[in-house]
Amino acid sequence: MHRRGPAFWLLTGFFALFVLFLYGPTITIMILSFQGPSGGLTFPMRGVSLRWFANLFEKQMVGDFAGSFQRSIVLGLVTMVVTVLASFSAGLAFRHRFRGASGIFYLAIASLIVPSILTSLGIGLLFRVLGVDTAWYSSGFGAHLTWTLPFGLLIMFAVFNRFDRRYEEAARDLGATSWQTVKHVIVPILLPSLIGVGLFGFTLSYDEFARSLYTSGTFNTLPLEIYGMTTNVTTPVLYALGTVTTGLSFLVIALALVSTIIVRRRRERHGSDAGKAA
Amino acid sequence: MRRANAWVAYLQVAPLSLVLLLFLVVPIATIVVVSFFDYTTTSIIPAFLLQNYEELLLSPVTWQTYLQTLEFTVITWALTLLIGFTIAYYLAFYVRSATWQTVLFLVCTIPFWTSNIIRMISWIPFLGRNGLMNTALLDMGLIHQPLEFLLFSDFAVVLAYVHLYTLFMVVPIFNSMMRIDRSLLEAARDAGASGWQTLWNVVLPLCKPGIAIGSIFVVTIVMGDFVTVRLMSGGQTASVGLMMMNAMSLLQYPAAAANAVVLLLLVLLTVGVMMRLVDIRKEL
């Protein structure tokens, strides 16, 4: 398309700098989290140790890291499941015309546009007015869904727009009920996207701070715990925490990519298995 | 059949609608209602007062804070747009193989999945007083004393915004660019347009929807932000979000609510203007 002139190399350089800008800091704190026992928050490294990671799991040192980690994972997983089910089902609904469709669509958009702090504040106030205590599994869960569901819905729109409806028509012509069509045709074909929506939902919830702030009640989720630590912890234990959570995020991403690739490979080898079970 | 379909559709969309109703519509309505309430140091009292708004809008601090937040918004918007557009342009038009395109695109998006707070913290070893930047500059002899403005300053706030949110520009703009019919570019070249002219007169106008979507994300996030400002300015700079947080921590819920309503109106107004440029549903 373009000859590889100076513009190409200039842009390549710019891109490389951008990637360095994106990853440099994270890699730096990963290195620094292995700081020796007498090391500080900046270079030089004074030896290499796992001390700060050990430190992380001693309860009295840095608040309740293990507990908040656990809560965030559970909340992330539940949010993931609900996000996949609710956005898939809503995606199916939006393929038909129904009264109020555009209203609901704009509501979902609004949920993305209204700043997180306002949603958080609103839910916090609502629970206070009602006299109900906020908790990460009730108000916090709802707050996370207002963030993950609209994203899930938008992805489902994109996915269904590219979905070849002839598969579905063929299934119906062969006598499949609509439930059978969903189960044996639509879901298998859309599986990679559904996995994507799920892991998207998980990471969004796992990292969410603002929406958790006034909705989590007594027990902190992980981002709240980290935020608390930034103000009163001045040792590399902060970086150890960063390394652990970032590592988990990377694991989730890798999982998403690998499972997408596996599904695709299987499909290439066997053709789609859609319809086989019927 | 037709009626059965509608019924099924309502059932299918019910979970999503219910969540949005209970955790978005009702809470926002609560904020609006509470913003008119009276309060003492210990409790909030149902009332219909305009006092919260009066106190908010008559205070010069409010105006300064809003101005500060708008300034951050405009600067961040301009920088993320410029960088995001350039990156998307490179990926869409200069990377030739589809595989490389996917890989490089993923490389750009992966940091988005990691914790924002951790990504902010990770600037400390770079920008701190004894950080890499200062050490390098000192070693090169360019400066004789460590620069103090690198960390805990407005500079650091903007840097963090750009670091965290440029992706929101890259993705939609890249998406728009990939939909541009390549024969249009050829036509432009055949008609004698230079590279710049093609970029300015063909590519840019066709990217408008992507730019609008990216801008909506960046602008709304920065306008409502408080974490980045709090962490990166070291508590020296104000933002509307922080102002609300302070009111909340003093248990002045109605005051925080009034501020929230004003911010919400401002955000909706801004987004309303940008939405005129784009039909989001068409873009998916």
Image (cartoon, grey):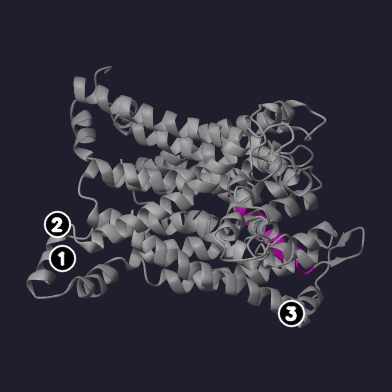
Work out how far the residue at label 3 is from the one at label 2, CA to CA, in angstroms: 56 Å
Q: Position of residue A77 (x, y in %)?
A: 56, 31
* Discs 1/3, front: 1
Query: What residue range appears in magenta?
Result: B24-36
- The answer to whether the residue labelled 2 contacts the one labelled 1, judged by CB atoms less than 8 Å apart, is yes
Point out which mark residue A1 bears.
2
Q: Position of residue A207 (x, y in %)?
A: 59, 42
Secondary structure mainly formed by the magenta segment: helix
Q: Provide the residue designation for mark 3.
A: B57
Packing grade of label 2 (10 A; few <14, some 14-19, many >=20) is few
Q: Chain of mark 3?
A: B
Packing grade of label 3 (10 A; few <14, some 14-19, many >=20) is some
- Dot 2: what SS? loop
The residue shown at (33%, 68%) is B208
The residue shown at (73%, 69%) is B258
Which quadrant is the N terminus of chain B positioned in? top left
Q: Amino acid at mark 2?
A: Met
Q: Quadrant of residue B171?
A: bottom left
Q: Amino acid at mark 3?
A: Leu
Q: Provide the residue designation for mark 1.
A: B185
